[in-house]
Amino acid sequence: MSDFFLFKYGWEILSHTGEHLFLVGISIGIATLVGIPLGILITRQPKFSQPILGIANIMQTIPSLALFGFLISVPPPIGGIGDTPAIVALTLYSLLPIIRNTYVGINGVDPAIREVGRGMGMTDRQLLFQVEIPLAIGVILAGVRVATVIAIGVATIAAAIGAGGLGVFVFRGIAVVNNQLILAGAVPAAVMAVLADFAIGWLEYLLTPTGTRKKEK
Amino acid sequence: MPPNNAIAVEFRDVTYSLNRRPLVSNLNFTIGPGETVVLLGRSGSGKTTTMKLINSLLTPTTGEVRVEGMSTVEWNPIKLRRQIGYVIQETGLFPHFTVERNVGLVPSLEGWNSDRIRQRVFELLHLVGLDPQVFARRYPHELSGGQRQRIGVARSLAADPPILLMDEPFGALDPITRLELQGEFRRLQQDLGKTVVFVTHDIQEAFVLGSRIGLMQEGRLLLLGTKEEFLRSQLPEAQAFMQCLNRV
Ligand SMILES: Nc1ncnc2c1ncn2[C@@H]1O[C@H](COP(=O)(O)OP(=O)(O)O)[C@@H](O)[C@H]1O
Ligand SMILES: [Mg+2]
């Protein structure tokens, strides 16, 4: 029983979970602050939508291990090893779902609604903040949710470049062929992903304006 | 010289083209203050386009539209639109706003204080025959089609604009509710004396509501005149619409 990973590595799990949360939290924070405005921008300037979505798409298709590895060779402060390159990589990874969902969500607002808003003398800003964002908020947050779940998984790779996190267990476990060690990293990461998914889903529900919530039954 | 305000809306040789295809062409007409002009035509005849040229959602390709003596391109578009109430078929209400916020939209954009907005909203709900105690807090999806259109009309009147644009406002309603709302709208119009441009493809509705009727076909205004003038018209399109009048 004392072999069971939770008992064996309890404190270590806590501290690596903290590191993991830190990496994911900062990255998703930056990706949200950058991605939502970018998504809005490309609804206003459609000529930028292809290039911006294209670049974000390419970021996501690079295998995560390769992206982390590549960043090692980039000079600091962006590259190298440690927290910063890990956050850079996770942020780049998280951008696509956030930009894309913002873009899709806002473009999905009924054109008649937008037109009647303009027709009644709303400025572009008023239309954006009072109509388009509130009506798209569910879709936008779904993007943040997907990005967060992906980032929690990808962040386990960050241990490969010395950023810590739950991946430390996984890599150590692989090196010494110890399943308990691998579980000590993988299980908390999976739990974290499930909880984040649930929490942001709940936020989505809270922020969706009452008049547009799907009927609860 | 008549003063500017003897004309509410004036089209001077207006053509609007999209990708070099004219959607409306060579429109020339004036609408006096307090008049209700109904634009009648089949769907695709250019009625909505004509309407959007008035509140500057579209800008003429050639010619000019003048509202209260000033060309729409000289108006600040935001200011112009807040002078013009706008009602469209069905989906016009914001689904995430309560009835109260929907109706109070333009006053709140205009920066009225909340007491004054609330008072105005209640006044308007009474005007369109809905009890504020019952309806103010509801969301559009909690209303019937007829109630929604009443709210749409109330919203368009909120900041007391001199001009109203109504694009098939009763088009999606069942015939009985439609008749009811037409009657109420007529009464309202007699009390308020707004300048109204009303779009419909229903000749019955045009006859009931319009002081003049403008008949549109393929982007052109074929005729603009009273019901009597319309009835005398020999134009094939006018005849075609009259065919629809008494078919029982
Ligand atoms: N955004 C648009 N793009 C292309 N064609 C349009 C657009 N809007 C309207 N049209 C065309 O313009 C013509 C007039 O449309 P509209 O003014 O909406 O007619 P109505 O309101 O009388 O039904 C139609 O042939 C329609 O297909
Ligand atoms: Mg139309």
Image: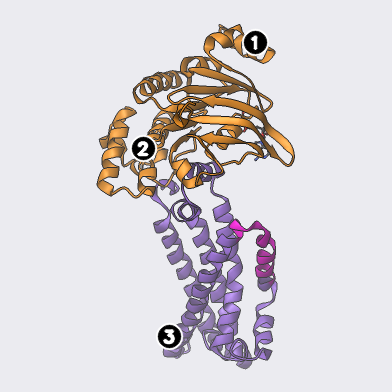
Pointer 2 residue: B158
| Picture mark count | 3
Amino acid type of disc 2? Ala
Percent from the top left, x then y, of residue B16? 66, 36
Q: Are marks 3 and 1 on the same chain?
A: no
First in sequence: mark 1 vs mark 2: 2
Does the rendering let one see residue A120?
Answer: no
Q: Magenta region, mostly helix, strand or loop?
A: helix
Q: Residue at x 49, y 62 (%)?
A: A141
Pointer 1 residue: B239
Rendered view: B133 above or below B232: below
Q: Is mark 2 within 8 Å of ligand 2?
A: no
- The crowding category of the residue bearing disc 2, from other C-alpha atoms within 10 Å (few below 14, some 14 to 19, many at least 20), is many
Q: What is the CA distance from the residue labelled 3 to the residue labelled 1? A: 83 Å
User: For numbered disc 1, what is the local secondary structure?
Assistant: helix
- The crowding category of the residue bearing disc 1, from other C-alpha atoms within 10 Å (few below 14, some 14 to 19, many at least 20), is some
Asked if residue A50 lies in the magenta stretch, the reply is yes
Q: The magenta stretch spans which residues?
A: A42-58
Pointer 3 residue: A14
Amino acid type of disc 1? Gln
